[in-house]
Image (tube, rainbow, N blue to C red):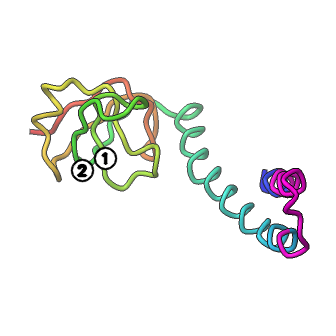
Amino acid sequence: MAGFFTWALVVGLRITGQEEKKSKFLLVALTPLFGLVLGTSAISLGGPMLGAAFFGSETQVEYTVVRFKRGSDRRCGDGVVLENLPFLFDSLCGVRPELGTKLERGQQVVVVGRGTWMGVYVRSSYDVE
């Protein structure tokens, strides 16, 4: 993937007429860094997802609430932002507004679904009283 990214940048520089030896050298020198970042992300995010899909069972995991966001973006309508989760995977979407407005920062939410302690494919959720 990192090699493809570097190749696409070099081709882009060539098409726009900005092809220089310095740019090519910098891109080729940074390819291992791109590979490290992409590879680390794939393993740290993909591993728990595959584990939950193939080896998961019915489970409950407790998370801490950061805030409730009401219809603020297209990707996740009414959602609860959860603490200590990776970027793009830190929201619990589709939360009923009557539940979301009751939630406060630091409050615990239990997520129920198929998965492991590393991650859950959410079926339902409820707040801890």
Location of residue 48 in the rendering, given as x and y in whole percent from the top left corner: 54, 45
Residue found 61% across the figure and 54% down from its top: 41
Location of residue 87 in the rendering, given as x and y in whole percent from the top left corner: 46, 50
| Marks 1 and 2, the one that precedes in the sequence | 2
SS state under label 1? strand
Q: Residue 66 — which label?
A: 2
- Residue 64 as seen in the image, left or right of residue 118: left
Residue found 50% across the figure and 33% down from its top: 56
Q: Between residues 81 and 53, which one lies in front from this camera angle?
A: 81
* Crowd class of label 1 (few under 14; some 14 to 19; many from 20; radius 10 Å): many
Q: Residue 55 — which label?
A: none
Q: Between residues 7 and 106, which one lies in front from this camera angle?
A: 7
Task: Read off the magenta span.
Answer: 7-23
SS state under label 2? strand
Location of residue 106 in the rendering, given as x and y in whole percent from the top left corner: 17, 53
Amino acid type, mark 1: Leu
Amino acid type, mark 2: Val
Q: Are marks 1 and 2 in contact (CB under 8 Å)?
A: yes
Location of residue 4 in the rendering, given as x and y in whole percent from the top left corner: 83, 50
* Crowd class of label 2 (few under 14; some 14 to 19; many from 20; radius 10 Å): some
Label 1, label 2: how many angstroms apart (C-alpha)?
5 Å
Q: Residue 82 — which label?
A: 1
